[in-house]
Amino acid sequence: MTALPIYLFIFIVFLNRYVFGFYLTLLRGKKLDETIEGYEPTITIVVPLFNEGRSIYDTIVSLVKLDYPQHKLEVTIVDDCSTDDSYEWAMKGAAEFSNVRVLRNPHNMGKRKGINAAVRASNSEIIVSVDSDVIVYPTALRELVSRFTRPEIAAVGGRIHVCNPNENWLTRLQTIKYYFGQEHLKNLERSLEQVMCLSGCLTAYRRHVLIELEPLLEDRNLFGIPIKYGEDRFLTHQIVRRGYKTRMTMKAMCFTKAANTMKGYFNQQLRWKRSNIVDFIVGVAHAWKLHPLLCIQYLSMFMLLLVYPFVIVTHVMRGDFLDLAMFHLAVIAGFSVIYYFAPSVRALPPWLRVHPVAFLPMAVLMPVAYLLLTPLGLFTLDSSSWETRGHQGAAQAAIPGTQVTAPEGAAPR
């Protein structure tokens, strides 16, 4: 009987995130992703850079070739004092393309302050944030800007695909996880035009909104401790808090490389866990200003983050962890079936799809992540590391056959 309230709470979370969200998407229909024709604002793509090596050059090449008027598009790379040859590769791109410029921070300042400097230096109407290991689909910019249908829409995010989905069991698992995180978990937020986290991988912002928020973004801290991670989540939350609308479209696509080792995966999850915790701590006092359904979702996810590790420990101490594990397995198996039959998945080319059985290990990884990473995240909130994934070549994976030559003066390190 003691477990009944917990499972009832989990059921409410599930109902709110999936069922209500799905119902609202059906209710809104085509209005969910309405567009405006002929809108071609000036755009600055801002790419924060830290230790990405040669892949930053591939990213630059892909950005300057996007389907958008070149006289209205510029690319700004902001190097946060990389310790490898990233800066030299970025300068190679700037030397080859006239609408590319490279800024370098005077010292390691973190991603957000670097982006702020690029925003100040730009005169464009729209700022597009792109991570340095991301390849953007050619039509993505047009898809993003066409969603700015009203002045109150301040930001529009895109869809992230995994470019190495079938590399190993871990990348397959993450491919399905990315699918649910974008196409289902955000349904409620998308329907209400209050998406609470737009990824730094690919998001367009109205520049005047970023300028308006700059003082807050520059001095982001928790109890006086500067916070450098989770800047995209924090920024999106502040935009929504000020009454602006945020949207997300599946038609603006980009590709990123999923972590292919357990160390890389848990580093990423730890960074995201810290970001979630900080966001909840800072934002819980303002949750009541959100739409009632979104307020319930926000508060229930905060409670789940804190309570679930105790649920796992309790089951272990009582000796019935197997029951909890089977519950996890049943839920994950259900998600796998949904993934397999989803029309949006079947419409993808075969190389972007994975076998649904690949999601089953999440039945183990999910409780491990809650049990270990939640307390670890709580005790390391003062981390200032970029925690990059330690890989290069997302562009090479996304565009087979791409070849580049080493930049002048870039010695191996």
Image (cartoon, helix red, strand yellow):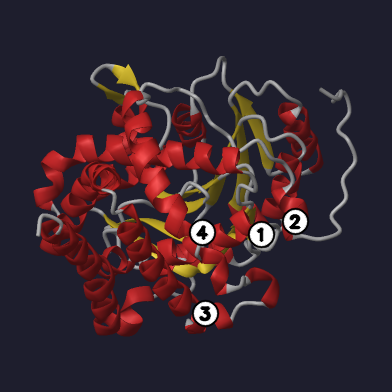
**Relative to 305, is 272 on the left or the right?**
right
Give residue 273's position: percent from left, percent from top: 38, 40
Q: In front: mark 2 or mark 4? A: 4
- Mark 1 in CB contact with mark 4 (< 8 angstroms): no
Give residue 252's position: percent from left, percent from top: 52, 65
- Residue placed under numbered mark 4 in the picture: 361
Q: Secondary structure at mark 2?
A: helix
Work out whether residue 39 can be spotted.
Answer: no
**Relative to 306, is 368 on the left or the right?**
right
Mark 3 and mark 4: span between their CA atoms? 16 Å
- Splitting the image into 4 quarters, where does residue 275 fall? top left
- Residue placed under numbered mark 3 in the picture: 340
Q: Label 2 neighbourhood size at 10 Å, few (<14), some (14-19), many (20+)? A: some
Q: Is residue 401 above or below residue 61?
A: below
Residue depicted at 52% across the width and 29% down the height: 386
Q: Secondary structure at mark 4?
A: loop
Q: Secondary structure at mark 3?
A: helix
Work out whether residue 97 can be spotted.
Answer: yes
Dot placed on the residue nearer the N-terminal end, 2 or 3? 3
Q: Amino acid at mark 2?
A: Ala
**Relative to 152, is 352 on the left or the right?**
right
Mark 1 and mark 4: span between their CA atoms? 20 Å
Q: In front: mark 1 or mark 3? A: 3
Q: Label 4 neighbourhood size at 10 Å, few (<14), some (14-19), many (20+)? A: some
- Residue placed under numbered mark 1 in the picture: 163
Q: Is residue 50 above or below residue 250?
A: above
- Mark 2 in CB contact with mark 3 (< 8 angstroms): no
